[in-house]
Image: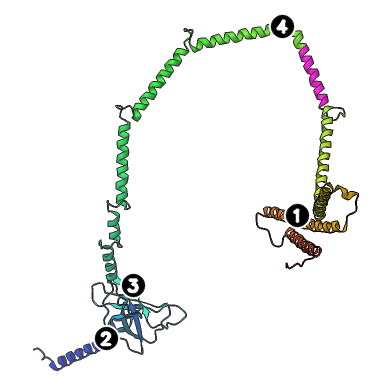
Amino acid sequence: MTKPRNTLKIGSFTILVVILFFMVLVWISKGVGGDMQTVVIHFEPSPSMPTIVPGSAVLVGGQKVGQVVEAGLALVGDDGDPNDIHVLVKAEVLASLKLRTDCAAVAEGPPLGGDGLVKLNLGKAADPFDGDYIKGAEPGGLGAIVSALQGELNGDDPDSLLGKIKLQLDPKDQETILGKIHESLSHVNAMTESMAKELGPGEGATLLAKLHEIVDNINRTTGQLRRELDAGEPQVLLQKAHLAMDAINDGIDSVSRILKTGEVPITNALVNIEKTTANIAIETDSSRADSLLAHLKTTNEQIGTAVKDVNTITSTMRDVVVLNRDNINRLLVNFKEASDHVKTGVKYVLRHPWRLLNAPTAQEMKQQAVFDAARSFSEAATRIDDASSQLRALAELHDGVIPNNDPDLEKIRADLLRTHQQYKKAEAELWKLLGGVNDSP
């Protein structure tokens, strides 16, 4: 006899299991409990970026510490650039997690597809994170790897791996590897073709034909040498060598006869040579006071002393000229003035020889004063000419540019000033003698 089923117990147990199941679902949907903090993350909108939606999990060390509450594209630039768009993600995580300045965030998609999740690296720096947002790193996971691999295998992108390989396999571009291989093979073909032509014996300009010609020349040369070394022919080299040896033998015999017949004269000549060498050795002996070498040595010393004296004299003359330069210049000026006076006096005596015997009258004295004034004017003009000559010489000495502080220039200025004063004085005396009035400045 079977026991009746207890339907009440079965129903009660089923209801309890369902209630527990719904409680677990509610607890899981609420996520992590406790105090939360808001974290903002900016990701680059790359093609490998996984889908991040509200409710996506946030993991730290593989443990769920929060979830995403908001995700979407946002313009983050301040300059209004429409291309400066990031994926802005706001997440709620446990407030007990302390972010550091070197914290990082990675978005990772599941291997089999679906919504992604965010992995946080809290960082290990000493300073806490105080920025407005965390800059997300490149996406991770199998999806990102597949996306990156897909980008590298895109042949239309010249920066991808496959694009670079295709670019290097272009035979039309000589800068690519395949183009350089084609060019190298072309050079190899040209070289092999040229070698085939050079090794052809049909043409005289080829390498093999020239080798044949060189071998023929060697054969002709060896044949000619063989003929020259044949002792049977009188015109060949070996026969001429025999004749030369016979001539040398005859010459040696002649020298031997001469030495035998002329032994005494040769001995006398050798004695004279010995005496001559002895005399030369005596004359070249510096220890003998009367030898030629001793006299030459004494003469050389005297010449050296004379050169030293000449150097001393020139040095002394230079010192005298340098120390008495102004005196020499004044002496030359005085000598020139004296010669000018003598010349003027001689001219005057030649024109008026009676002045040597008769005393001049008052009228003649007046005329003489006028002549003296004119001579003063002439002397002033001569001094001006001398000053201009000195200025030209000074300009040539300084290549046309005379320094303002040059002492010679100062002397010429002083001489010109004295000449001007003498000129004004002679002019005043002349006007006084003539009885006129001098209105010149």
Is disc 1 placed on a helix, strand or loop?
A: helix
In three-dimensional space, the C-alpha distance between marks 2 and 3, rounded to whole angstroms, equals 29 Å
Residue 28 drawn above or below residue 223:
below
Q: Which mark is residue 138?
A: 3
Q: Residues within 10 Å of mark 1 (few under 14, many from 20)?
A: some
Q: At label 1, which amino acid type do we have? A: Thr
- Examine the rendering and report whether any part of residue 79 can be seen: yes
Callout 3 amino acid:
Glu
Point out the tag, 2 or 4, that comes first from the N-terminus.
2
Looking at the image, can residue 316 be seen?
Answer: no
Residue that badge 4 annotates: 260
Q: Earlier in the sequence, mark 1 or mark 3?
A: 3
Q: Which badge, 3 or 4, comes first in the chain's sequence? A: 3
Q: Position of residue 339 (x, y in %)?
A: 82, 50
Decide if residue 410 is on the left or right side of residue 55.
right
70 above or below 205? below
Badge 2 vs badge 4, beta-carbon distance below 8 Å: no
Residue 228 image position (x, y, % from top left):
47, 13
Which residue does the numbered mark 2 point to in the structure image?
28
Marks 4 & 1, CB-CB < 8 Å contact:
no
Q: Can you give x and y, in whole percent of width and height, for residue 64 in the image? A: 32, 81
Q: Nearer the viewer, residue 277 or 312?
A: 312
Would you say the residues marked 1 and 3 are in contact, meaning their CB atoms lie under 8 Å apart?
A: no
The magenta region covers: 268-287
Q: CA distance from mark 2 to mark 1?
A: 129 Å
Query: At label 4, which amino acid type do we have?
Result: Lys
Crowd rating for badge 4 (residues with CA inside 10 Å; few <14, some 14–19, many 20+): few
- Pick whichever, 401 or 417, lies toward us: 417
